Amino acid sequence: MQRPIRILGIDPGLRRTGWGLIVIDGNKLGYVACGLVETDDKADLATRLVTIHNGLQRIIAEYAPEEAAVEATFVNKDANATLKLGQARGIAMLVPALAGLPVGEYAPNLIKKTVVGAGHADKAQIRMMIGVLLPKADPKSHDAADALAIAICHAHHRQRARLELKVAAR
């Protein structure tokens, strides 16, 4: 018999990093909490990254997840924005890794396909399905809803991800 597992989903962003915590118990999903780590857009980059780091550390200390998942970065036309997003994503991966959590990475299209059933779903469709899959959840932002979607995606794909890590380690 497996015990319940808490999964922290992280939607990295320099302005707003969404986070969502779910619990899986067998094949049942449950909502725990969600929210944002927001930075001051007038602050320098290093200060903003520290804010994300400290916010995620507090969330991990408070909710004690066993696993984490982060959305993979997509490249857009603005190379500078992509680089800054990559730095926020690095913090989003580093904090749970430093806490000893395995961190899964998932492409945006896989997250959408897992949660909505279509790889090109929009934010409204994701929020609607979050309400169906996690009826007690009430994310106040798209970023928090996306983080819950990332956690749900990890819940569905975590066994395959662990097998791939074991094979790669050999």
Image: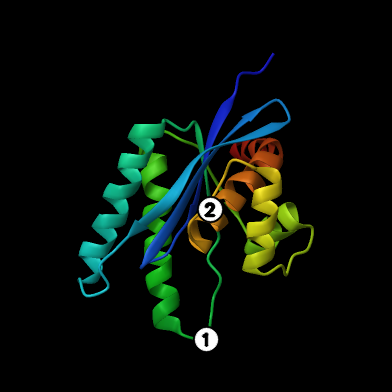
Residue 146 at x, y percent in the picture: 56, 57
The nearer-to-camera label among 2 and 1 is 2
Q: Which amino acid does label 1 sit on?
A: Lys
Which residue is depicted at the point 25% across and 69% down? 45
Q: Mark 2 points at which residue?
A: 147
**What SS does tag 1 mark?**
loop
Is 99 situated left or right of 112 in this image? Answer: left
- Image quarter in which the C terminus is found: top right
Between the residue at mark 2 and the residue at mark 1, the CA separation in whole angstroms equals 24 Å
Mark carried by residue 119: none
Q: Mark 1 points at which residue?
A: 77
- Image quarter in which the N terminus is found: top right
Q: Quadrant of residue 44?
A: bottom left
Sequence-first tag of 2 and 1 = 1
Does residue 10 lie above or below 141 as drawn? above
Residue 115 at x, y percent in the picture: 71, 53
